[in-house]
Every structure is written in structure tokens, then in C-alpha cells.
Image (spheres, rainbow, N blue to C red):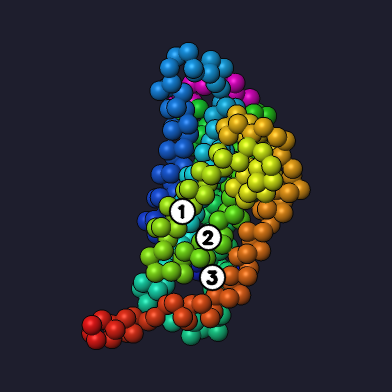
Amino acid sequence: MWSCFCSEWAKLRRCQILLVGLVALTLCPLVQYGTQLIMEPELRDPNYDIAHLFSAVVWGNTQMFLPLSLVMIGGWMIDRETAQDTLKNLLCVPLSRPRLLGAKLAAVVCLALGLGVYSCAATLAAGRLFALPGWSGPVVLAGCGQILGASATTALVCLPLVLVFGQRRGGYLPGAILTFFLGYSILFFKSGVLLSAYPFSAALILVGFDMRGYNGATAAPQPLLSAVGLAAMPALALVLLALSGRWGRRTLPTRAARHRRGRRR
């Protein structure tokens, strides 16, 4: 399993699709601060500082930029084995399909943490570029810690989405679009059970993020309920992994089979 993970990680580092994540997380602090610039002067926050930028980046990453990147990249990692007809060769080695997909999911989690580190650097660079006030060691450590924590919890939320859409031919693109809307839905849950249990909300609540200034939450979150909502996602991923062998044989024909099917048409 470890050698399979190392192989997947090495392949991922050489793929140009990584640029999707890097560009998205570079844009996040720029977009978040840009919203201040395009507001009417009387609506701008006169006390906007580096702490506000960190909070805005945590929100933007979890709501949109990171889930979209992870589902697209992770789904592509699975889809490429079928598109390039390499899956059957991998499965000739004594390696089961669930273990192969599990290694890819582990690579996605590590990618999320790596992108979290990159997002911290991008946020610090943007803060210096825009000459934001409020710099201090505790503020920077708290902001970076929250970004990294939210990256980890968001990765757990995305695992079943990566599996579902990665195992469907070309499904990672519509999967990324659907993930965008799922993340955007945080805005609609302001109270009640879904405020805490909705997985994308739970990813923020469990790292101590206050959503009241972003989605107008009117009730206090329930961390225990958030833990249950978040834990349901990797649990679902484990179920999908267990079912992946039979699902894969049914939905992923070889290149030769696709060629014969095309000739009959």
C-alpha cells in the first residue's frame, strides 16, 4: 500500500493538472481582497487587516476553491487509468482495485495539505502586497493553522465525491461543477441541524471558524453534530471503496472493447 501511495504521489507531482489547484488558491486571497476594492467606499471595512484576509481565505478555500480543485484533480487521477488504458496493467500486479483507489485518495489528502501550505504562503504574500495592517506572530500562526485545518477537513468531505466522479468516464469535470454548487450551498444554512451537520459547514466549524460574518448564521454551531456530519463522508468513501471492484468492472471497459464497439457501429 505504501509503495502504491508513493507511486501515485510521484505521478501526481509530474501532472500539469496541478496548476488548477495552484491557480485557484493563488486567486483566492486576490479575489477576497478584491471584493473590498470594488465595494462602494461607505460599505468597505475600514479595519480590514491580515486577520480578516486569513478568515476570508479560509471561507473561500472551503466553500469553493479547494473542493473544486480536489475533485477535479483527484477524479482525473482515477479517470486517467481508464483513459490511458493502464488500469488493467496495474491490476495484474497483486494489488486490488480498492487498495489502488485508496492510495489515490491518500494522495488527494496529502495534496490538500500541500495546497493548504501553498495557500498560507499566497495569503501572506497578498497581505504584504496590499500592505495590510495587523501583523503579529500569533495572528499569522492562527491564520495559517486554520487554513491547514480547513484543508484537511475539506479533503475528508471531498473523498466520496472524488471516488464517485473519478470512476465515471470524464466525470471529474461535471463532478467539479457539482462540488462548486455543494460548497456554495453553505450560504443557505443559517440555523438548524444543517448549519452544523452539512459536511462543508462542518469542515469550517471543526476548525473554529465563525461563519456569522459570511453566511449570516443566526444560531450557535454544534461541534458534536459537525463531527458526525464530517465523519459520514470518509465513512461513505470506505463503503464506496469496498464496492469499487464490482462497480469498476461494470463501468470501465478496456480500450480494445471500446474499439470493437466502435467498429460495430
Residue nearer the viewer, 179 or 120: 179
In the rendered view, tell whether residue 247 sits above or below residue 192. Answer: below
| Residue 32, horizontal then vertical, whole percent | 48, 31
Mark 3, residue position: 101
Q: Secondary structure at mark 1?
A: helix
Q: In front here: 77 or 220? A: 220
The numbered mark at residue 161 is 2
Secondary structure of residue under mark 3: helix
Residue 245 % position (x, y) = 54, 79
- Residue at horizontal 43 percent and vertical 33 percent from the top: 31
Query: Badge 1: few (under 14), some or many (20 or more) residues near its Cα, within 10 Å?
Result: some
Q: Is residue 56 above or below residue 238?
A: above
Asked if the residue under mark 3 is in contact with the one under mark 1, i.e. CB atoms within 8 Å, the reply is: no
Q: Which span of residues is magenta-colored?
A: 128-136
Q: Residue at x 40, y 74 (%)?
A: 82
User: In the picture shown, does residue 157 fall above or below 148?
Assistant: below
- Asked whether disc 2 touches disc 1, contact meaning CB atoms under 8 Å apart, the reply is yes
Find residue 5 and report its horizontal and vertical position in percent: 55, 67
